[in-house]
Image (cartoon, rainbow, N blue to C red):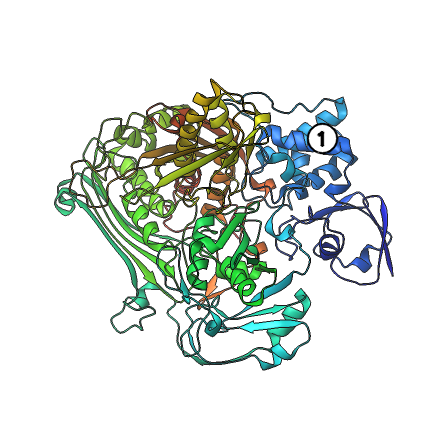
Amino acid sequence: MYTLNINGKTVETEQDKKLMRFLRDDLGLTSVKDGCSEGACGTCTVIVDGKAMRACIPMVSKMAGKKIVTVEGLSEREKEVYGYAFGKVGAVQCGFCIPGMVLSGKALLDAKPDPARIEVIAAIKNNICRCTGYKKIVDGILLAGKMLREDLPAVDDSGEVTVGQAMQRVDAKKKTLGTGVYVDDICLDGMIYASAVRAAHPRAVVKAIHTEKAKALPGVIGVYTAADIPGDVKVGHLKQDWDTMIPVGETTRFLGDAICIVAAETMEMMEEAKKLVEVEYEVLTPLTNPFDAMKEHAPALHDGGNILADVHLSRGDADAVIEASRYKVTRHYETPWTEHAFLEPECAVAMPFDEGVFIYSTDQGTYDTQRETAEMLGIPKEKVVVENALVGGGFGGKEDVTVQHLAGLVAYLTGRIVKMKLTRKESIMIHPKRHPMWMDVTTACDENGKLTALKAVVISDTGAYASLGGPVLQRACTHAAGPYNFQVIDIDGKAVYTNNPPAGAFRGFGVTQTCFASERNLDLLAEMVGITPWEIRYRNAVRPGEVLPNGQIADPSTGIVETLEAVKDICENEKYVGLACAMKNAGVGVGIPDWGRCRLLVKDGKVRIHSGASCIGQGLGTVLTQVVSETAGLTLDELEWCNPNTAIAPDSGTTSGSRQTLVTGEAARRASLALKEDLKQYSLKELEGKDYYGEYLAKTDAMGADVPNPVSHVAYGYATQVCVLNEDGTIKKMVAAHDVGKAVNPISVEGQIEGGVVMGMGYALTEKYVLENCVPKSKYGTLGLFKADKVPELESIIVEKQGIDVACGAIGIGEITSIPTAPAIAGAYYSWNKDFQTKLPLTGTPYSK
């Protein structure tokens, strides 16, 4: 018998297990998050005898006699303070790391009520945050300390709020205090557990699957193979080429392929049964890179061959213009695989419902999950209802189904409630990554530094399945020339299947890779011309009314010049400095129908905001709340943002492409205008039960459309980022100036910028997803993620420029914040040591291992 003091109460248990599992599973203290179970992320942080400690490492037996505190055990005053302070400063985005951050902060404040900023940073240095860049978390802990010392009140936002107001996010408090529900926090009576047996080889024929021993194990509900799938075996976000499970006689394409699914009454029984499944393989040689996969006699990994997508963009005669230009630069660039490393691993809870299934999911598109699951089950999509719980980060990595459809299958076959969750090792292996790319880029200019032409060849490794590989390649190519007045381009790109893990959407969507290459070339051209890197960008930055490289006319909101002007002084006055510019589309674009939809339902005296658009930490619920409040003239007490649910909320597309603020924001504004008209005559009580619907089509032209100046995207965001180094080569400061049209919530915009910059710093300096012969070798703790004590001073400059006539003028900012960071950092190191590097992560820096 082990006796522990947990949140001031004596608790006894006879079973020895990991402390985290005891707190979550036995006591229901779900503020203690399971981010990795490897002691690497800090989401499971608790306080043990006054010190912050990770709960996933020690056994209960080692905690006997100790006093343990979780967020649930904070005093009411502490809950009030931390809930307010973290929300007020904008410290909460996806929120999955926040309870652990709160306890790390509390342990410090209990010991030292008035700490220095550097002491707060040290206190959270073992807690990973992938969203915020840490700055605002430090601010939140410092504000909490001040409130506790000075007994300051916590005054929440109230009344009407406006677009442009730095309000607290609508979900910040529940995320901070651990009362918000993520999928893994759901525990229902009679729930069973499921997990897949994964492929033992990246490329091998499955000859036989022996499940008899596993099925015979007590507590096992069933073992299911591809033969048990009632509908289509193949699923896919855009292209249906991803096997739900590999049928006998078919060939695996990567190590993450599911061979069969085991369902059991407990997690322990499930894991034991998985070990008893025996699979016979005929092992084949895998294709480890796109160059081997493109060879003439390479085995075809999919019907149609190994080329997923082939893009060619051309305006003018690039070869002739480059030949005639005064200066030209050609370099070869390479960028690596990158893991999203969101703090919340993939999880789904599914249950039988109305002759179909109901799925709680953590994903970036409830309607995508609904469609793919319905096709796999062979039932009408209306029979699959999907609801987002809180989503603990995504960054593009949760656009594809991973466990949602598998959980739905088990629920459909067994008639039981089932939870299916990826371990961190499985997550790192299975979900699509950022594409590695190989790029040959030539850039030319005249004697005055006026850019004349760009030519590029881009090869991407899209891995085992399509995912978003085609659109990612498109964006990589269409944005390769950057926000400059190029009128002659020739860009060729190929996305190639291999037996590596799939590659798909990742913050920046291909532009992160090509921007690194094209921006680096500009630094060399500036040297040749004899002007500064800032000057060559300023001379060529596209202005409103000019033509973008893709032929689209730059609209009045185009603000790349203003972002450059915002950083001019720091570029001129610092010794070791690098800068880079970027543009990034908002919305799907290129002629694909792109609808935003919103439904406002008056119920119980409140207006409930329903949209199928997922909030993955970017703050969409708050954006829609501000738009509706300002447009309809309603107070916060009269509004409630609801989690996306396909049975209630209209389809508003995937949370991808920096689209939701603009596209769904405009739909919400239109619905609010109709509501506003009725509120002129009736009270909310009199409007009980009434619905207001708004939709917006972001209309664009298809790639290659035979029209003058085709509109590829309804809007673009623009940015200039600057890196300043100290004499020792460490980063002194990062400055990021971003044109956002209209900042709906400035504190959230700053948080997006800071988080994106720190993610970009990792991409530039430390992060690498290691593969050896198609086998992932990285663990969460070895990915090279930036921690709080390595983050330099961050300065966000918000540039607001009118010109977009929808969504109150707002342009999405989620992706562009990471795009120019790496070339800016590379430029700074070039100014420091004159080592012109063309591969990421950079080597020879104080951050190199």
Viewer-side residue, 523 vs 25? 25
Instruction: State the residue position of label 1.
Output: 80
User: Where residue 86 sits: x, y (%)?
Assistant: 63, 32
Viewer-side residue, 671 vs 215? 671
Q: Which residue is depicted at the point 81% across and 55% down? A: 63
Total marks shown come to 1
* Residue 758 against residue 352 in the figure, above or below: above
Q: Residue furthest top?
A: 680
Label 1 Cα neighbours within 10 Å, binned few <14 / some 14-19 / many ≥20: some
Q: Is residue 474 left or right of residue 262?
A: left
Q: Which residue is depicted at the point 74% across and 42% down? A: 72
User: Where residue 520 sits: x, y (%)?
Assistant: 33, 42
Q: Is residue 469 left or right of residue 405?
A: left
In the rendered image, the quadrant that contains the N terminus is: bottom right
* Residue 786 against residue 574 in the figure, above or below: below
Does residue 732 appear in the picture of this structure? no
Which amino acid type is shown beneath numbered disc 1? Glu
* Residue 385 against residue 669 in the figure, above or below: below
Q: For numbered disc 1, what is the local secondary structure?
A: helix
User: Where residue 546 sits: x, y (%)?
Assistant: 22, 29
Does residue 188 appear in the picture of this structure? yes
Viewer-side residue, 545 vs 488? 545
User: Where residue 804 sits: x, y (%)?
Assistant: 34, 27
